[in-house]
């Protein structure tokens, strides 16, 4: 059984009553203190929004795969703490009253109808609104700068953790393993498209991977995880969700961010411009090497392939979970553009301009518009 299959089978499935019991037992909440609790959409874990005594919290119940790897849970804590200490608005963990540790351990029901020991974390809620439906070209540049700041911090602190060095299907280093799931893409033409991208990855990326820088990665920089902070007059952005963190190719973090920018509310009408604005913001603070610039368009495409292929597989396992289809159709549209045979030179030039010191928002927007008008 693959890592991805295990995650789906070992996803916790709690009722609201069971969630309340965990909060009472592990963090000392009392039932009369709760004014609201609701389940949140999540890919592999079971998350709850909690409001009690006028304060808001996020409770995350980890899937069995991550729960069996305490080191990855510890790595998430270390990354959150590092970023918070260095000025990034992000989640902060509340220690379990039972143990005094960052994580509580509870026996929970999971998707495959068994019961198992799972890690549970309680965090302060990051106030604000996600960029879902709120992305603009300007905000995407700011988001790219936030990710650039994150990598400045990682680099300055030489941040690493044993938990980051793990197998994770969403890690771009494992893109070829997606072939085990492409049969879940039922449309033959679309399946051929994604398999073609994976073949290019094997030819063009794996052959030069020794020349790529590696780093700690947030690895899921999308508009649901970027928060426009409440009360911010300057467009301050916050960052949440460290479930996909790994140690991998540094360029993957901006490739992932660019891919998700292309399916944001701004990207749905301007997919190439959106991706380029994210790249522009990032590279103002954290420049890329020539090899990273060369591979960036293909790696951006690879993230979209991961999204649609693993989304199709997960939807087969959980057909009632609409969250799994959130990025599906926009991702397919972006894939069709990024793989368009007649646009390959234009896309390379656009991404190169966005990552060049000579690029400006105006020149990038103009080049993106010309390219998109060729469709």
Image: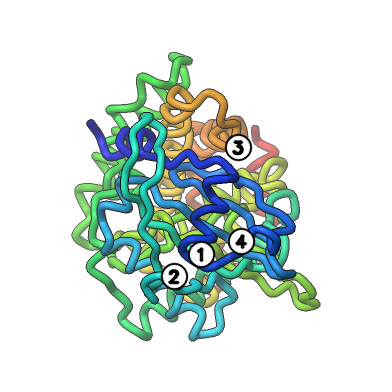
- Image quadrant for the C terminus? top right
Sequence order check, earlier mark of 1 and 3: 1
Q: Do the residues under discs 4 and 3 have CB atoms within 8 angstroms? A: no
**Residue placed under numbered mark 4 in the picture:** 226
Closest to the camera, between mark 2 and mark 4, is: 2
Q: Residue at x 62, y 60 (%)?
A: 277
Q: Is residue 133 left or right of residue 243?
A: right
How far is mark 4 from mark 3, CA to CA?
16 Å
Q: Out of 189 and 134, give the one closest to the viewer.
A: 134
Sequence order check, earlier mark of 2 and 4: 2
> Where 24 falls versus 368 (above or below)?
below
Mark 3, Cα crowd under 10 Å, few <14 / some 14-19 / many 20+, is few
Closest to the camera, between mark 1 and mark 4, is: 1
Q: Do the residues under discs 2 and 1 have CB atoms within 8 angstroms? A: yes
Sequence order check, earlier mark of 2 and 3: 2
Closest to the camera, between mark 2 and mark 3, is: 2
How far is mark 2 from mark 1, CA to CA?
8 Å
Mark 1, Cα crowd under 10 Å, few <14 / some 14-19 / many 20+, is many
Question: Which disc number belongs to residue 326?
Answer: 3
Q: Do the residues under discs 2 and 4 have CB atoms within 8 angstroms? A: no
Closest to the camera, between mark 2 and mark 1, is: 2
Q: Is residue 14 visible?
A: yes
**Residue placed under numbered mark 2 in the picture:** 96
Q: Out of 186 and 65, give the one closest to the viewer.
A: 65
Q: Give the image quarter of residue 225.
A: bottom right
Q: Position of residue 37 (x, y in %)?
A: 66, 52
Q: Secondary structure at mark 4?
A: strand
Q: Give the image quarter of residue 374.
A: top right
Q: Position of residue 19 (x, y in %)?
A: 54, 50
Q: Secondary structure at mark 1?
A: strand
How far is mark 2 from mark 4, CA to CA?
27 Å
How far is mark 1 from mark 4, CA to CA?
19 Å
């Amino acid at each position: 059984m693959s890592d991805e299959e295990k995650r789906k089978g070992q996803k916790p499935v709690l009722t609201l009553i069971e969630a309340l019991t965990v909060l009472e037992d592990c963090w000392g909440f009392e039932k009369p203190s709760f004014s609201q609790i609701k389940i949140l959409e999540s890919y592999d874990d079971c998350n709850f929004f909690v409001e009690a005594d006028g304060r808001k919290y996020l409770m995350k119940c980890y899937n069995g795969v991550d729960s069996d790897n305490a080191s990855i849970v510890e790595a998430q804590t270390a990354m959150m703490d590092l970023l918070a200490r260095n000025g990034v608005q992000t989640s902060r963990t509340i220690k379990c009253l039972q143990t005094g540790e960052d994580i509580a351990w509870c026996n929970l029901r999971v998707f495959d109808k068994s019961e198992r020991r799972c890690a549970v974390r309680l965090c302060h809620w990051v106030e604000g609104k996600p960029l879902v439906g709120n992305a603009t070209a300007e905000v995407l540049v700011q988001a790219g700068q936030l990710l650039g700041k994150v990598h400045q911090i990682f680099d300055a602190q030489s941040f690493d953790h044993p938990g980051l060095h793990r197998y994770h299907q969403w890690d771009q280093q494992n893109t070829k393993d997606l072939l085990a799931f492409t049969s879940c893409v039922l449309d033959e033409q679309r399946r051929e498209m994604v398999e073609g991208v994976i073949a290019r990855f094997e030819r063009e990326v794996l052959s030069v991977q020794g020349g790529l820088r590696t780093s700690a990665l947030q690895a899921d920089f999308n508009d649901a995880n970027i928060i426009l902070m409440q009360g911010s007059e300057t467009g301050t952005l916050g960052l949440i969700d460290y479930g996909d963190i790994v140690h991998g190719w540094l360029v993957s973090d901006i490739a992932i961010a660019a891919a998700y920018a292309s399916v944001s509310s701004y990207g749905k009408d301007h997919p190439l411009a959106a991706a380029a604005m994210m790249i522009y913001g990032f590279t103002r603070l954290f420049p890329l090497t020539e090899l990273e610039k060369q591979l960036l368009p293909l790696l951006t495409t690879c993230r979209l392939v991961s999204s649609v292929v693993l989304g199709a597989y997960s939807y087969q396992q959980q057909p009632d979970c609409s969250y799994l289809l959130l990025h599906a159709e926009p991702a397919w549209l972006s894939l069709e553009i990024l793989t368009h045979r007649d646009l390959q030179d234009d896309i390379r030039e656009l991404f190169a301009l966005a990552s060049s010191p000579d690029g400006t928002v105006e020149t990038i927007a103009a080049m993106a518009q010309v390219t998109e008008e060729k469709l």
